[in-house]
Amino acid sequence: MSLFVADTGEADLPVVVCLHSLFLDHTMFDAFTAAVAGRFRVVRPDFRGQGANPDATDLVSMDDCADDVLALLDEMSLERVSIVAQSMGGDVAVRVASRRPEVVERLVLLGSSAREEPAEHLEAFRPIADEVARHGFAGDLLETTMQIMFGETIRNDPDRAELLVPWREHIAALSPGLVHAIRGVVERPSAVDALPRITARTLVVSGGEDGARPPAWSQELVDEIPDAELWSLPTTGHSVILELPEQVIGRVAGFLSEGQTGS
């Protein structure tokens, strides 16, 4: 499947592929892209049925999305890349990095895990998907989604309120057609067994206020990926790169720059 891709296009720079969160799109990495200009070529696809791509007509699985990313790498002749991924993007990234370990040099997993949803999460998330299919995002559902995506500290901090405004507007405007992507994330199978096959040096960034992907799930990534380290941010929620952009972007860019060989 052909995906929409934002690509800075520099053929002579090492490549970073950014994989976005459910409910968001490639624009969540705008600040990161600006910060690493001149150091990395940044490739940002929108997942099938999300962002600038047409609505899906059937469930979009994490394996579908991994297949799409691998096909994109082949189509663009990208033989060696680093990946920065948030949430759903992390579900896809661990599948890509475990299937084709020779392609992924460095891996950054933000607010991510490799688990399936536990039963108690399924009970909460399945009705959300049903409501999106009927009405899109509005009222209490919009507020619930904001609580999933952003931590309590930032939501209660008036000095940072402006950081949330564009994302609230973005989520409010999402199509009911997003339900197929939502169900693909909610119903995903575990990929924990694939983690030991990842050879990329990995940075896992975990928010202490992340209820969607709790810190214990991040620790599991570090325990199972052979060369992984954990960075915990106690007063940050699910969307770490949006909640603390300067700190997180700086740390991620530095991690990617260490020993980078390019593509």
Image (cartoon, rainbow, N blue to C red):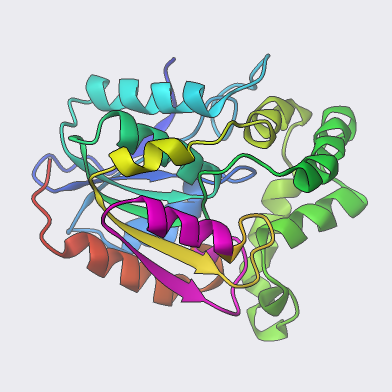
> Magenta residues, as a range?
216-240
Height in image: 66 above or below 86? above
Residue 217, magenta (yes or no): yes
Residue 89, magenta (yes or no): no
Residue 25 in sight = no
Residue situated in front as seen by the camera: 200 or 258? 200
The answer to which quarter of the image holds residue 260 is bottom left
Residue 231 position within the rendered picture, expressed as x and y whole percent measured from the top left: 41, 71
Residue 42 position within the rendered picture, expressed as x and y whole percent measured from the top left: 29, 47
Residue 82 position within the rendered picture, expressed as x and y whole percent measured from the top left: 25, 47
- Which residue is painted at 48% across and 62% down in the image? 219
The answer to which quarter of the image holds residue 93 is top left
On screen, residue 193 versus residue 74, left or right, reads right
Residue 191 position within the rendered picture, expressed as x and y whole percent measured from the top left: 48, 36
Height in image: 196 above or below 135? below
On screen, residue 150 versus residue 231, left or right, reads right
- Which residue is painted at 67% across and 49% down in the image? 170
On screen, residue 199 versus residue 28, left or right, reads left
- Which residue is painted at 48% across and 74% down in the image? 232
